[in-house]
Image (tube, helix red, strand yellow):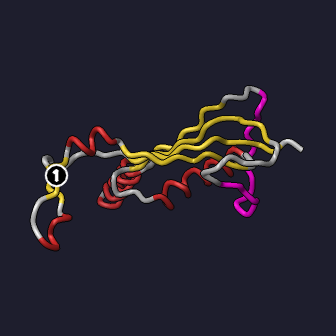
Amino acid sequence: MKKLLAMLLIGLFLVSCASNVKFVQTDDTFEPEERPSSAPLVYTEDEIERPHKVVGVISAELGKGARKPELDALIKEKALELGVDGVMLVEYDVDKDVYVDSHHGIVGRGPWRRHVVTKTPHVKVKKTASGIAVIFVD
């Protein structure tokens, strides 16, 4: 009974910590096909110069503790799962309204000037990254 309860709690914890990765397909002719993790993937914040066709948008969302490499990894994983050749024009954002509204200004003097006081200690801030999924046309 204890093992079952422990497994249930672990499962609930993993589901609650799961990230939210979405793919919005814009090309109806694109058929997703998983690629091996060792396959090359072009990933850039700039536009890809090589001839390509846009197939959709991939976006990932994590909590306020998320870092850029974590968001990048989620998008790359989804890109390989879909079988695209690259992700371009990747942009990063934070839920600015929630973040700004939940913090006071900077307080203190000297080395403590960078300390930020929060109005509410338990605010959910979402960090997102999104990019355009492409396949190469040769």
Q: Residue at x 48, y 48 (%)?
A: 92
Residue 89 figure quarter: top right
Please say if 52 is above or below 30.
Answer: below
Question: Badge 1, how many Cα within 10 Å: few under 14, some, many 20+?
Answer: few
Horizontally, is 124 left or right of 130 in the view?
Answer: left
Main SS, magenta region, reads loop
Which image quarter is the C terminus in?
Answer: top right
Q: Of 131 and 33, which appears nearest the observer? A: 131
Asked if the stretch drawn in magenta spans residue 30, the answer is: yes
Relative image position of residue 60 (x, y in whole percent): 50, 45
In the drawing, does residue 135 fall left or right of residue 44?
right
Check disc 1 and report its element: helix, strand or loop.
strand
Q: Which residues are magenta?
A: 29-43
The residue singled out by tag 1 in the image is 105
Q: Residue 49 at x, y = what percent?
A: 77, 48
Q: How many marks?
A: 1
- Residue 71 lies left or right of residue 84; in this view the side is left
Residue in the picture at 56% in, 58% down: 73
Residue 34 is situated, as x and y percent measured from the top left of the image, at 73, 48
**The disc labelled 1 sits on which kind of residue?**
Gly
Q: Nearer the viewer, residue 47 or 99?
A: 47
Quarter that holds the N terminus: bottom left
